[in-house]
Amino acid sequence: MSKKGLFINYEMCFGCHSCEMACSQEHKLPAGEFGIKLTQYGPHKNVKGDWEYTFVPVPTQLCDLCGSRTATGKLPACVHHCESECMEYGDIAELAKLLEEQPKSVLFSL
């Protein structure tokens, strides 16, 4: 069985928090607990004078990549509900290839 993972292109994330909400509902997490947490950098004016505002969804220790969902062929809740479609779930080796094409990304696996 191949190792599975989560690819997140943070250049595409616009900070909607749907990943957080979907995860919390799927796992029935109490308020203040997250399986994935959206972090943000900015707004910040860089040395070039450009404004930066970056969002990065970060899986926490509570993330199990929705094992009960993926076991039945469904996507993890965060990926299924991502409005910007910045997340992909799949074989970690295949997802690693996406890093070459989309360098402003991160790869997560258990």
Image: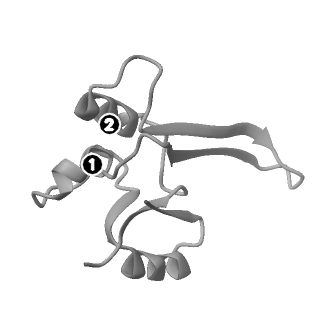
Residue toward you, 24 or 40 = 24
- Can you say whether 30 is above or below 92 in the image? above
Q: In which quarter of the image is the C terminus?
A: bottom left
Q: Which residue lies furthest to the left in this view?
A: 72
Quarter-wise, where is residue 98 in the image? bottom left
Q: Give the labeled residue for mark 1.
A: 66
Taking depth in this image into account, of 14 and 92 the one nearest to the observer is 92
- Tell me which amino acid carries mark 1: Cys
x then y, percent, for residue 24: 33, 30
Q: Where residue 8 appears, x then y in whole percent?
A: 46, 59
Q: Residue furthest front?
A: 1
Residue at 52% in and 46% down: 58
Q: From what the image shows, is residue 65 above or below residue 104?
A: above
Residue 93 tag number: none
Of badges 1 and 2, the one in the foreground is: 1
Q: Which amino acid does label 2 sit on?
A: Cys
Q: In this view, does 82 lie above or below 34?
A: below
